[in-house]
Image (cartoon, grey):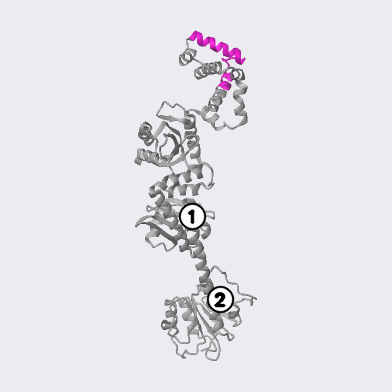
Amino acid sequence: MGGPLTVTLVGFKLPNRTECPPTAILTVEQLLQLPCVLVGSPQVIADAASLKRHIGWAHVLENLNPGSYLRGQELVLTTGIGWALDANFEQFTAELAELHAAGLVLELGAPCPSVPPSLVQACRKRGLPLIVLHEPVAFVEITETLHQMLFSSQTRQIEAGGEVTEHFTQLMQQGAPAETILLDCARMLGEPVVLEDTGYNLLRYASAVKLPSNFFDQWQDRSRVMHRAGNIERQAIPIRIHGKDFGSLIAPKTAAHPAGPLHVLTMAAIALGAELLRKRRAQLWKIDTACELLDDLLNHREADTNLLHGKFDAAGFPMRNKALRGFAINLAPPIEPREAARAIEKAAGSKASVVIGALHSPKPKLFGILSINDSDTDKVLAKNLQRITQSDLFIGPLYLGEIVSGLASAQFTISQAIDGCELGLEAEKTIVHAGTYPLALLTHELRDEPAMQRLPQHAFAAILTLDDKHRSEHLRVLEAYLSSPTNRSQAATRCHLSRTVFYQRLAALETILGMDLNDAKTLTLLTLALTVYRQSQM
């Protein structure tokens, strides 16, 4: 039964205590660190690559008929006392492999003084760990230690499961928002978790680790394929409420937790289901998802542009290679933002993909991005959107920013639209292209700068010291003049004054201000100062 063998020695030193992770099921590799095993001078004879296998139980087996005694995932201990000289190790290891045995431990001694080469060959063929003990070991000590550790692991798993259940139950009772539920789930698993709808579109995600740039690339296509394959390469739990499917909660295959990652995902899915019931329809989450994406964009929460593009795409808002235009419009109180958002989506139809968010200060408004293919589509889209300004859902015109490409420039066009909306530019119109008012947008952007705030006091301090009646009249005349400085007759008409009276008022202004109203630099200064002053009065 003997013969030369190629062996791999296990170079472990005898520790003074067992080093087994308390949060993990014991593996064959960890078994080799146990003092009760190390006293037997263990050697890994076959398939060292399979030492990561989990041990579900330990069983002493002295015959070659494992199917009659094992249920699966056992570590088999034997002295070979029941083995015949012509033992069929091929059949023996095949049965062990079919039962997903964790490994085979053979104690050398009188019954089996050396390792049968055919056993080594069979174990290597089946990828079954074969460990030889060169010194006698009391198997009862190994089984007792293993079973105590397994019971301890199971107890810890039960305790951890109770903690997870209690945590998500509390979140559910408190009405915690989806982002809180997802973030806690991600922290527990140490991996990103994604909530998607039944169309494989991203609704929410949370991560306790930095995501790679391509994490969300082709998300819908990849997720569809993985679902159909049974989610073998990841962990997924469906969110099913009252017999209806609302989507899935997904984590990578590497996610881990003492209670088991599927238990964590299941409890988080139940809490998310309660949130869905509270909001009544999963579709209502779309504007929440858009708000998160827009918040990431406008507040630079995501510096990786590729990852941000992927998030927009995964949420069903394609932005790559598209013309992007920001928009904003005031809501008519007490209109609910989601109702108004649906009106905008309906008006856009198939002409554009629309990402819609909501702002509540200083006035409630909707804002976002229109994603279009070309300028011709933009013209048709503008006509469709013009109709919504005549509904009872909105107040004032729809403000549009300039057309840009790429999310890196999207903040610019969105800010243009929002600023134009807040300034109330050309409020009598239905569609206002905010980019055509660069001075107003500039002063609005710089409104918090101290130097800009002081400008009106410096430019026309003499007017501001007058009583309300005279101050208002002088500023009205100045504003009319600055709107048409090269055509005083037109400015007089705009001011509803005769040319004679208007010229008299201009002369009085020059005296009060001590400035030449024909000087280009003076006109520039006064225009900027008046714009800042008007905006400060809003």
Indicate the position of residue 225 as horizontal and vertical percent values: 39, 58
Residue 19's place in the image compared with 253, above or below, is below
Q: Nearer the viewer, mark 1 or mark 2?
A: 1
Identify the image quadrant of residue 385.
top left
Residue 299 is a magenta residue: no
Indicate the position of residue 137 as horizontal and vertical percent values: 57, 85
Residue 391's place in the image compared with 179, above or below, is above
Is most of the magenta stretch helix, strand or loop? helix
On screen, residue 461 versus residue 191, left or right, reads: right
Residue bounds of the magenta highlight: 499-526
Mark 2: secondary structure:
helix
Q: Which residue is mark 1?
A: 171
Q: Nearer the viewer, residue 8 or 413?
A: 413
Q: Earlier in the sequence, mark 1 or mark 2?
A: 2
Q: Is residue 256 visible?
A: no
Indicate the position of residue 7 as horizontal and vertical percent values: 56, 80
Q: Is residue 118 visible?
A: yes
Indicate the position of residue 69 as horizontal and vertical percent values: 43, 83
Q: Which residue is mark 2?
A: 31
Residue 516 is a magenta residue: yes
Amino acid beneath label 1: Leu
